[in-house]
Amino acid sequence: MCAAASKMDELVEQDLAVGNGPQAVGEAGSQAELFHWPIVTEEDEQAVLEVLRDGGRPSGTDISMQLEAEMAAWHGVKHGLTYPNGTLALQTAFWAAGVRRGDEIIVPSVTYWASAMPAFALGATVVYADIDAATLCIDPNDIERHISRRTKAIVPVHYCGHPCDMDAILPIARKHGLKVVEDVSHAQGTLYKGRIVGSFGDAAAFSMMSAKSFAAGEGGMLVTDDDGIQQHAIAYAHYARHATLEHPDLAPLGGIPFGGIKGRLNQMCSAVARVQFRHYPDRIKEIQAAINRFWDLLADTPGLRAHRPAADSGSTMGGWYSAAGHFLPEELGGLSAEKFCEAVRAEGSDTRAGCNFPLHLHPVMNDVDIYGDGKPTRIANSDRDLRQPEGSLPAAEATRGRVISIPYLKHDRPEAVEQHAAAFRKVALQANKLV
Ligand SMILES: Cc1ncc(COP(=O)(O)O)c(C=O)c1O
C-alpha cells in the first residue's frame, strides 16, 4: 500500500466531524494560498502602474491590441478583440454571427445566464438544449429537435472547464447552416482531442473577470478566424477602430457603434491579462495536477465520480474553472447532495450541492416582459411560445441533486490534496450514519 493511501485510510477511518470526530482537513489543507486566485505578483502590479501613470493609456488600445494578437495566435485564428466583459463579447459575437430580431439561438440550459441573455438584447430569443449528464455540456443528441427555421446559432459552453463534444456538434451546425459561437468562459486553455477550445466555432467568446481561470480583473475576448465576423464585431462596439473597417457594407458607416455600446477594455486589465497569459500554461498545469490527484485518490469511492475527460483522450480541463464532481445518491443509500456537502464542510473541506440553475426554468426567461411588449420577452422576440416547462430537460434539472462542487485547488501539494480527498471519502464511506 502506498504512503498516500495509508495516510488517507487513517483519516477516513476516524469518526465523522459532524459526529464529533476529528476533521479530515488539517493544517496542510487549510492554507488559504491553496485556493487563492488569481496569483498576482509584482509583475502584474508593475504592468498596471505603467498604464495608470502614463496619461491617457487606460483608454488607449495599444496594449489591448497586443493582447488580442496573443489570444488569436493562442487559438490559431486570425483575430482577437477585447471587451470590458465576457457578456458583451458574447453579445457582439451573436450579432456578428448574424443573430437578428426574431432569431433563435440554442444554448445548454445549465450555464451562466450570459451565454444566453444577450439574445434578448438583440431582439432574438433562446431555446435551451439539455446537457449530457457526464460532461455537463450541451448534449449533441438534444440539439436537432430544437432547430427551427429561425435558428441562427448553436452556443456550446465548455462547462466547468470540460470540453464539449465538438466532433458531434459541428456536423449538426454544418448540416443546418448554423453558426457556432463557443462560450469559453470556463475553459481557457482546455484541449478537445488535442486542440484548444475556442478554435472550433465560427467565433468564440470568453470572460476574463477575476474569478475565471484566465483572469484579468475584468474583461472579455472574442476570437475568430472569420474576417466578416471580425469586421462586424468592430462595427458593433469598437467605434474607435472604425477606420480599420474594410468590409464594403460597413466601412462607409463608421463612427458610431451599431450596437450603441462601447466595447473598449480598460488597458490596466489588458496589461494584467498579458502578464497572466505568460504564466498561464504553468499555472493551469499545476491546477490539473492537483485536481487529477484529488480524483485519482477518490477512484473507487462510492457515490462520487470525476467530472473530467478520459485520461487518454487528448482532452483536458484547462484551468478546471469552478471544479465540479458527479454525485450518485443511489450508491450512498439515498443520502442527499446537501447533507453530503454539509458533512464534508464539517470535515474542513469545501463543497456545495448543484451547479448553475437550469435556465429554462428561471422566471426571467419565461415570465418577465423586459421590453414592454405586453408578453414575456422570450415569446415576444419569437413567433411561437418557446417556454420549456419543468420535466422538459431532465439531465439539466437533475444536476440539482447530482452535481457538487469540489475544492478548487490551485496548487498541487500532495498532503493538502490528500486531506481534502479524505474528507470526501470519509463522508462517502460513512454515508449510512447520515441517511
Ligand atoms: C459561461 C459564462 N459565460 C459568460 C460569462 C460572462 O462573463 P462576464 O462576467 O465577464 O460578463 C460568464 C461569467 O462571468 C460565464 O460563466
Image (cartoon, rainbow, N blue to C red):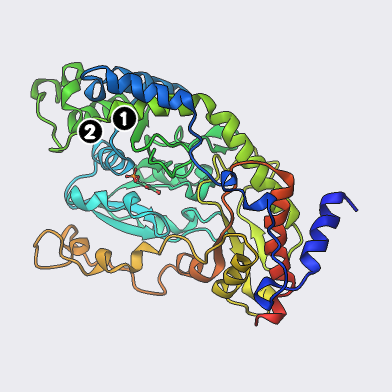
Query: Label 2 neighbourhood size at 10 Å, few (<14), some (14-19), many (20+)?
Result: many
Task: Please identify the quadrant where the C terminus is shown.
Answer: bottom right
Q: Position of residue 186 (x, y in %)?
A: 46, 45
Q: Please say whether residue 394 is visible from this viewpoint.
A: yes
Say whether residue 103 is left or right of residue 274.
left
Dot 2 beta carbon under 8 Å from ligand 1: no
Q: Does dot 2 land on a helix, a strand or a loop?
A: loop
Within the image, what quadrant is residue 85 found in? Answer: top left
Q: Is residue 429 above or below residue 289?
A: below
How far apart, in angstroms, are the residues tagged by discs 1 and 2? 7 Å
For mark 1, what is the residue? Answer: 82
Say whether residue 203 is left or right of residue 94.
right
**Mark 1 or 2 closer to N-term?**
1
Dot 1 beta carbon under 8 Å from ligand 1: no
For mark 2, what is the residue? Answer: 263
Q: Amino acid at mark 2?
A: Gly
Q: Position of residue 228 (x, y in %)?
A: 27, 27
Within the image, what quadrant is residue 134 found in? Answer: bottom right
Which residue is at a point 55% across and 32% down the rendered structure image?
195
Asked if disc 1 and disc 2 are in contact, CB closer than 8 Å, the reply is: yes
Q: Amino acid at mark 1?
A: Thr
Query: Label 1 neighbourhood size at 10 Å, few (<14), some (14-19), many (20+)?
Result: many
